[in-house]
Image (tube, rainbow, N blue to C red):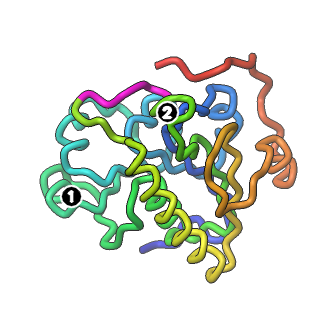
Amino acid sequence: MSRVWSGRTVACIASGPSLTALDVGRVAGLPTVVTNDTYRIVPFADVLFAADHGWWQQHWHGIDVRAQKWTTSAPAAKEFGLHLLPTTRGNSGATAIHLAMERGASRILLLGYDCSLEYGSHWHGAHDRTDNPTADTVRVWRGDFKAVAADALRRGVSVVNCSRHTALDCFPLGDLLDELRVLDVEPAPQQERAHVVA
């Protein structure tokens, strides 16, 4: 795999209900990986990752972003001409972090990584054809993230969870504005909105 983001800071944006339009706008300009339906509110995404063949079957004809499209599903890759990541790290959010590391990221900022049902399932509400996530799947996902955190530590990759609400304790927590100041990035001023509206 090409390490096109070697030494770069990358934003990984999942679909937790804490995700806000303000935070999405603030990371514009960074290399960005989004998971599943979150492509709908991150038009500048560089990579769209979704693991499940069924997700691609349901959404393929409505995807209108230029992002590279990746999956860990060989049938989905064959059917839709997607890039295939041969290894999975469990859930899509964890695998997105892995993908960013494989492409050379040295620092990763997480948004929408709630891993909790306290404030709902996703910023976009429930999926049409699945009850995912459930309390059981969320517990499994936390194990996936711990494995990815250990991998990041071995690689010397810094992963900072800037999600506004999160149950994950395997990554350091950070304030997005503070993390962007480290990069000397000055986000464009935007009006605060409580949550992204689909």
> Is 19 left or right of 144, judged from the image as shown?
right
> Is 36 left or right of 93, judged from the image as shown?
left
Give residue 110's position: percent from left, percent from top. 63, 50
- Residue at 21% x, 58% y is 77
Judged from the image, the secondary structure of the residue bearing numbered disc 1 is helix
Judged from the image, the secondary structure of the residue bearing numbered disc 2 is loop
Query: Is residue 45 positioned above or below 152 on the image?
Result: above
Give residue 28's position: percent from left, percent from top. 65, 39
> Is 38 left or right of 85, judged from the image as shown?
right
Asked if residue 94 lies in the magenta stretch, the reply is no
> Is 175 left or right of 114, judged from the image as shown?
right
Q: Which of the pair 44/143 is nearer the observer?
A: 143
Compare marks 2 and 1 and give the one earlier in the sequence. Answer: 2
Q: Which of the pair 28/130 is nearer the observer?
A: 130
Q: Where, quadrant-wise, is the N terminus in this rendering?
A: bottom left
Query: Is residue 86 positioned above or below 182 on the image?
Result: below
The amino acid type of the residue labelled 1 equals Ala
Q: Which mark is residue 92?
A: none
Give the spatial CA distance, label 2 vs label 1. 22 Å
Residue that mark 1 sits on: 77
Asked if residue 127 lies in the magenta stretch, the reply is yes
- Residue at 63% x, 83% y is 154
The amino acid type of the residue labelled 2 equals Pro
Query: Is residue 115 positioned above or below 16 on the image?
Result: below
Give residue 192's position: percent from left, percent from top. 74, 19
Extreme bottom residue here?
Answer: 154
Q: Which of the pair 134/130 is nearer the observer?
A: 134
Residues in magenta, as a range: 123-128
Q: Which mark is residue 43?
A: 2
